[in-house]
């Protein structure tokens, strides 16, 4: 999995007034916890978070808090309900020797059989929660839809990856190919024409008599 470096400044004043002041100065309050260590409160320049937060990628984060280095994953992020500014981020410290649970993006590939037949592909979940050792975590999870037919689905239970355990419930639908009007209309027209064709034969016989 890709990594990203992030530098922070430790903070001790946790009062609301101090937090508001930090945010006014373009700083985002953060905390890192887990892996048996005590919580560390720190701040990061908001500009430094753009590549981490506003990205479809998932990263392992190399945190440098005033020289204290640790590796973590972003666990929770809070946004302002009106401005969407980043208000707070929780990081979870990880151990290279222990599996971690994290959401990994899904990459769809292949030309679906159902789409070739006139259906439309619907992607319902673009990330899957998995568990693996940090060194075994992939950047993305490839899902081949070549054999996905009309009306069929691919669920989390249909997938498997080497050295990666899928945590997302097996019944969770990743993608499906649904019927479109372009496919349904000809079928309806054919069905409607069949009775007419069937009744025309007796009528013709009656005229011969």
Image (cartoon, rainbow, N blue to C red):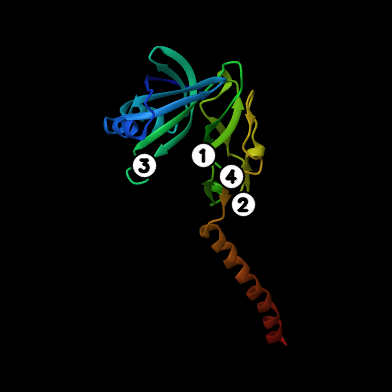
**SS at badge 3:** loop
The dot on residue 151 is 2
**SS at badge 4:** helix
Q: Position of residue 3 (x, y in %)?
A: 45, 20
Q: Residues within 10 Å of mark 4 (few under 14, many from 20)?
A: some
How far is the residue under mark 4 from the one under mark 1?
20 Å
Asked if disc 1 and disc 3 are in contact, CB closer than 8 Å, the reply is no
Q: Which residue is mark 4?
A: 113
Q: Residue at x 68, y 74 (%)?
A: 198
Q: Position of residue 52 (x, y in %)?
A: 40, 28
Q: Which residue is mark 1?
A: 126
The dot on residue 80 is 3
Asked if disc 2 and disc 1 are in contact, CB closer than 8 Å, the reply is no
Q: Residue at x 48, y 16 (%)?
A: 70
3 or 4: tag closer to the N-terminus: 3
Q: Is residue 179 above or below residue 125?
A: below
Question: Is 72 in front, or is 29?
Answer: 29
């Amino acid at each position: 999995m890709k990594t990203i470096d992030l530098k922070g400044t430790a903070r001790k004043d946790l009062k609301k007034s101090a937090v508001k002041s930090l945010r006014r100065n373009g700083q985002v309050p953060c905390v890192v916890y887990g892996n048996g260590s005590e919580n560390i409160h720190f701040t990061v320049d908001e500009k430094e978070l753009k590549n981490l937060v506003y990205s479809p990628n998932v990263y392992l984060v190399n945190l440098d808090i005033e020289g204290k280095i640790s590796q973590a994953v972003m666990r929770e992020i809070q946004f302002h309900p009106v401005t969407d500014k980043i208000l707070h981020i929780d990081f979870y410290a990880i151990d290279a020797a222990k599996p971690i649970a994290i959401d990994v993006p899904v990459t769809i590939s292949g030309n679906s059989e159902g789409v070739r037949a006139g259906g439309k592909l619907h992607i319902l979940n673009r990330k899957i929660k998995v568990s693996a050792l940090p060194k075994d975590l992939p950047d993305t999870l490839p899902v081949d839809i070549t054999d996905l037919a009309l009306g069929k689905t691919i669920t989390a239970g249909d997938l498997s990856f080497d050295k990666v355990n899928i945590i997302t419930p097996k019944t969770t639908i990743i993608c499906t190919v649904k019927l479109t009007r372009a496919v349904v209309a000809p079928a309806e027209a054919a069905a409607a024409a069949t009775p007419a064709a069937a009744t025309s034969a007796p009528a013709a016989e009656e005229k011969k008599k």
